[in-house]
Image (cartoon, rainbow, N blue to C red):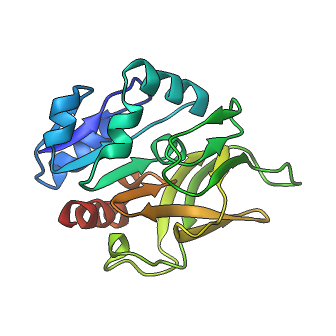
């Protein structure tokens, strides 16, 4: 059973639909025992990092998430809150990934937020088995995780090269939305479920 952590941060429906298409059994929950007993954990998120961290703290989920030893995948804000800290609200995060979350710089002809399809490159993980560099995935974000030792995929937007995906031990994160990234995203989710 896959646990989708519910911490009131965004649309879970697209994640639920993607898992259903893959034939996976899942539950949306913030119950600690259910999360601990799951085979895999998803931490999706849309919105503000500071609000996300406040919601995780309110539900006493921070230490629980850090202590998990089965595969965990953070998506978008779910990945960002697993970094060291975020400029969005100047908040300390879960400190799982050795990355800082920063706002995209203002540049001519570069719209913020970064919305739409963009490529991934420098793929370095079982998460990307069967995925070729240059494949397109779907992004919606104004903040990004810097390149760091935990970076397992990169993307460029404007002049900024950033972490498209991160990994530390059993923790994975994608800045893009695999659940909205068509066949490529479904392959990435299936690879995660195969871990």
Residue displayed at 55% across by 24% down: 51
Number of marks in the image?
0
Left or right placement of residue 45 versus residue 144 in this view:
left
Left or right placement of residue 59 versus residue 79 in this view:
left
Q: Which of 25 and 137 is in front in this view?
A: 25
Among the 4 quarters of the image, the one containing residue 157: bottom right
Given the current orientation, which residue lies at the most extreme top position? 58
Q: Considering only vertical position in the picture, is 183 above or below 143?
A: below
Give the position of the C terminus as an image quadrant. Answer: bottom left
Q: Where is residue 9 in the image (x, y as percent from the top left)?
A: 44, 28
Give the position of the N terminus as an image quadrant. Answer: top left
Q: Considering only vertical position in the picture, is 52 above or below 129?
A: above
Q: Which of 73 and 57 is in front in this view?
A: 57
Residue displayed at 19% across by 66% down: 194
Residue displayed at 39% across by 40% down: 44
Q: Position of residue 165 (x, y in %)?
A: 49, 62
Residue displayed at 77% across by 62% down: 158
Q: Considering only vertical position in the picture, is 108 above or below 167?
A: above
Left or right placement of residue 134 versus residue 115 in this view:
left
Q: Where is residue 124 in the image (x, y as percent from the top left)?
A: 45, 78
Q: Position of residue 95 (x, y in %)?
A: 53, 47
């Amino acid at each position: 059973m896959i646990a989708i952590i519910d911490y009131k941060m965004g649309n879970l429906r697209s994640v639920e639909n993607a898992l259903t298409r893959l034939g996976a059994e899942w539950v949306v929950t913030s119950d600690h025992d259910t999360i601990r007993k799951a085979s895999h954990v998803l931490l999706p998120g849309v919105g503000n990092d500071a609000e996300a961290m406040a919601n995780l703290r309110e539900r006493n989920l921070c230490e629980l998430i850090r202590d998990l030893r089965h595969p965990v995948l953070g998506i978008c804000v779910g990945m960002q809150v697993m970094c060291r800290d975020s400029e969005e609200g100047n908040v300390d995060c879960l400190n799982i990934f050795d990355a800082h979350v920063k706002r995209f710089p203002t540049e001519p002809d570069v719209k913020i937020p970064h919305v739409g399809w963009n490529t991934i490159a420098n793929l370095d993980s079982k998460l990307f088995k069967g995925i070729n560099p240059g494949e397109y995935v779907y992004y919606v974000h104004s903040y990004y995780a810097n390149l760091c030792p935990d970076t397992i995929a990169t993307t460029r937007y404007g002049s900024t090269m950033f972490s498209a995906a991160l990994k530390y031990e059993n923790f994975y994160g994608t800045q893009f939305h695999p659940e909205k990234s068509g066949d490529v995203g479904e392959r990435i989710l299936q690879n995660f479920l195969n871990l």
